Amino acid sequence: MNYVDSSLKVVGTRPIRPDGADKVTGRAVFAADTRAPGMLWGKILRSPHAHARIVSIDTSKAEALPGVHGVVTAADFPDIPSEEAFVGEGPMNFRDLALNCMARTKVLYEGHALAAVAASTQAIADQALALIEVNYEVLPHVIEVEAAMADDAPILHDDMFTAGVTPKPTKPSNIAKVVTFKKGDAEAGFKEAEVIVEGTYTTQPVHQAYIEPHACLATYSPDGQIQIHSSSQGHFMVRAYTAKLLGVNLSNIRVNPAEIGGGFGGKTLVYLEPVAVMLSKKSGRTVKMQMTREDVFRASGPTSGAWMSVKIGAKKDGTIVAAKQVLKYQAGAFAGSPIGPGCMCGFAMYDLPNVDVVGYDVVSNRPKVAAYRAPGAPITSFAVESLMDDLATKLGIDPLTLRVKNAAKNGTKTHYGPTHQNIGFTAVLDAVKAHPHWKTPLKEGQGRGLATGFWFNIGGESSASVHVNEDGSVTAATGSPDIGGSRASIGMMVAEVLGVPATTVRTIVADTASIGFTHVTGGSRVTFATGMAATQAAEKVVEDLKRRAAQTWDIPVEAVEWKDGAAYPAGSNAGAFEPLDLATLALKAARTGGPLIAEVSLNAQGAGPGFGAHICDVTVDKETGHVTIDRYTAIQDVGKAIHPSYVEGQIQGGAAQGIGWALNEEYIYNAKGQMENPGFLDYRVPVASDVPMIEAVLVEVPNPRHPFGARGVGEVPIIPPMAAIANAIRGATGLRMVDLPMSPPKVRAAFDAAG
Amino acid sequence: MAKTYVSATINGESSEFLCETQQTLLDVLRDVVGLTGSKEGCASGDCGACSVILDGRLVCSCLVLGVEAEGTTITTIEGIAQGDKLHPVQQKFLEHAALQCGFCTPGLIVATKALLDENPNPTETEARYWLAGNLCRCTGYDKVIRAVMDAAAELRGETVG
C-alpha cells in the first residue's frame, strides 16, 4: 500500500526534530517568554454585554492613575473602509478585523475589546481598566443561528444586506450571504430514488483551544519603525494586518515569529498586535500583551456552530441518485463563517449525479469565528456521514460497502465544479477493509462507527532559502512558522536533495525582513508548498555545486553528477577525478564564485486533496450517558509521509480534537448572552485519560505535483470523528444522536426519550 | 506595595527573590527569577503547563503563591536535564515525537518525572490518569504515553523493543 521509493535516504525516516531539545528543556522562546527593558504591560477592556451601543467612553481617570502611560480606544485608530483581504486562511474584511480588535460604535459580543491601557505593572493596568467609564446602551442580543435568521431578530449590522440573493434585499439582515451549489437535477433524482433518508443536525461552536494564549511584544520607534514579536500562524499575516489597521507601510514593520504554542487555524488573524503597537506609540515604551484563558475563549474565534438538514436518495443497490443539504453556519459577530467549504466538503467524498446545497452565513452576538482545522468540513461531514450510516441501515448494506459503491474517484466531477484528480479515497477505503480493526468482532454492548472526510488542502505563496555554510553544514530558512514539526520535514527534504544526513541541515523560521513573503501556516500547506520552495532552493544549490565542480575539474557541467552529498564525474568519459563533497566545495566557495546560497519564492499549485476514514468502537454507560472510546483507528491518504512520526501525530491530534468536539466541547451561554464556561475546567478538552491509543494508518498515494509526493495532512483527521462516534453510539445503543456534543446529559436524555 | 523576601532552592541552587504577596509562583519564576520554561496556559490549575515539583510534590505553580515558596525545594523544567545530558524522559519525548508545538511539553515532562519518581512501573492507565492534569491539544496523547512508558522502562534498566 505504501509508496516506497528505494532511492530516498532521508525522506520517510524519523530523525529527531531540529528544535526538539529547546522544546523539552524549556528553552524555546514562545511569545510570552520575551521581555524588553522598560517594558509596559498592555491590557484590554472588554464588553460585559453581548450587544450594546457605546454612548461614551471616559478614560481620563485611567490616564491620571500613576503608572499608566497610555490609553487607547477606537478613536486612536484609522476608521478604515470595507475591503476584502486574502492574507489569512480565508477571506477577511479589513474593516471587520479593525472593529473586532477595537469596537467603535457598538460592542457585538461579550468580550469585545473597546479600550486598552499600558501600565508599568499588570496590577496597575488592571486598576486602570476599572477606572475607564463606559456608558452603554444595552441592546437586545441574539446567540443561536436560527434565532438570528428570524424576521424579528435584533440586527447586528445596519449595513448588512444578504448577498447572493436577487433582487438585492432592502432590509438589513443577520444573514450575510447565501451560497448555492447545484449539480444535475436533485428533485428529478429524488423521484428516481427507491429509498430516501433525511436528518436534521446541530453542532456547537468549539474553540481551537491551543494551550498558548495569544501574546505579543511591540515597539514603536519615533521614526515610525515598528518591531513585533508574536505568536501567530503567519508573521507576514501579522505584518499585513497590522499595517492595514494602523495605516502604515509594510516596510515599517518587522515581525519576529515566536515559537507558536498551537493554533489550529485560530492564530491566522490578529487581536493584540495593532493594539500593542498603538499603546507603544502613545507611551513611547515597548508594550507586552497576553490574553488570559478567559480572553481566549470569550474574544478569540472558535469555529461555527451550525444547524443542518440533509436528504439522500438511493436505489436499492445502494447507488445514490440525489443528495440535498441546507447549512446554516454561525459566523460570530462579523460575516465570514466557513460556509463555502461547508457546502463543498459534505458530499465531496462521493460520485453523485444530482446535488443541491444551500448555505447561509449568519452573524450573531458571539465572538467572530476563526479558522479551525479544515474550516467548515467537520460540521457538514457530521451531518452527511451520520445520514450515510442511516442509509446503510435502511438498505441493509454494510456502511463500508455503501461508501465504496459511491466513492469519488479520479475523474469524478464534484458538485462545486472541479474534477477530482490523483485522489486516494478508494485506497483509503481498501485500507479500512483490510484493517484488523474493521474485522475484529465487537464485545457485548459495544458499537462500531465508520465515517470519512475530505479536505482540499492548499498550496500558495512560500519562500525558502538554503545556505551552505563554510564548513559544508546547511541552514534552511523559510517564512513558515513551525506549528508541529515542519522544521524537521523541510530540513529532511533539503537533506534529501543535497544527499546529506538530516542532521547536517538546520532549519529556521526567518522573520519578515529576512525571507520572502510566505502565506500563513494553514490549509495543510507548509510541507507541501514551503517544502516545494525549499526543495527547489536545494536543487538550485546542487546545480551551483555541480557548476563549481565542473569549473574545478575544467569539464562541462553536464559531465558532473551529484549523488550522496558529492560531485562525481558522470561516467568515465568525463575524466577521472576524486569526488568533491559538500564540505570541500564549501571551503573553496570563495574561489569558485562566492557563497553557496539559493532562495526560491513560489506560488505552489496542485496541493493534492486528502481523504480519511476513521473507525471507532465505543461503549455507552446507560446510567450516566458517558461514552467511552474503546478503540480508534484513523486511516488517511497522506501522499508521501516525509517524517512519518509527525504525520501520525497530526492524525492522532486531529482525531483527539474531533473526539472532544463530538463528546464534550461547547460554548454555554446564559440569558444575557455571556459565556458561562470560559475556562478549561468547564470547557473540557480531551485529557489523557479520555482517549485510547489512536492508531494512525498512513496510506500513500503520491501527489504528482509535489517533488516527494506529499499531500497536506493536518486537517483531514478532524473531519470524520464526530460522525464516526455518532455512528458507533448508534451501533451500541440504537440511539441516533443528531446534536453535538454527545455529552452525558444529552445521551442520558436520548435514552430517556427512547424510553 | 511592600515586597516579601523569599529564599528557596530552585533547580539545586539557593535562590532569593522579592515578590509581591499576590504574585503566584509561576509569575515569580517567569517574571522575577527569569525561568520562562514553565508556561501559563490558564492560570487556574486546569492545564498543567506550569507544572513544577515542589518539595517532592507535583504542583501547578499558578496555584501556589510566590511567598509560599519560602524554604522549599523546587524543580522546574530547566532543572530536569543534567548539564548537556537530557533526562531519559526528555530524550524519549524527542525519540517518540511526543510533541508538536511544544508549549505543554515542559509541564508534561515535569509531571512525567514526578510520576516516575513515585511509580517507576506505571500501567498505561495509571500514566494516563496521572497526566490527566496536563492538557495537550496537539498530539492526542498517543505518542506522549508511548514516550512515558518507554522512559519508565529505560529508567528501570529495561530495554523496550
Image: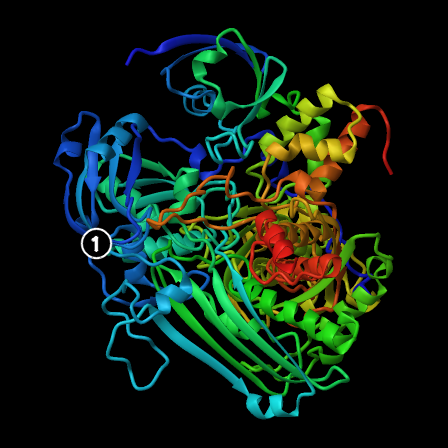
On-image quarter of the C terminus of chain A: bottom right
On-image quarter of the N terminus of chain A: bottom right
In what element is the residue under mark 1? Answer: loop
Write the residue at 64% across / 52% down.
A650
Q: Residues within 10 Å of mark 1 (few under 14, many from 20)?
A: some
Which residue sits furthest front? A755
Depth check, front residue: A106 or A524? A106
Vertical arrangement, residue A344 with respect to residue A277, above or below: below
Which of the 4 quarters of the picture holds residue A678? top left
- Where is residue A211? Give x, y as percent: 52, 41
- Where is residue A48? Give x, y as percent: 29, 44
Tell me the chain of label 1.
A
Which of the 4 quarters of the picture holds residue B157? top right
Q: Name the residue under label 1.
A: A104
Depth check, front residue: A550 or A660? A660
- Where is residue A91? Give x, y as percent: 40, 66
Which of the 4 quarters of the picture holds residue A127? top left
Q: What residue type is labelled 1?
A: Arg
Asked if residue A663 lies left or right of residue B142, the reply is left
Vertical arrangement, residue B124 with respect to residue A317, above or below: above
Residue A221 shows in this picture: no
Asked if residue A327 lies left or right of residue B134, the reply is left
Asked if residue A48 lies left or right of residue A340, the reply is left
Write the residue at 54% across / 55% down.
A465
Write the residue at 74% across / 61% down.
A731
Depth check, front residue: B160 or A576? B160
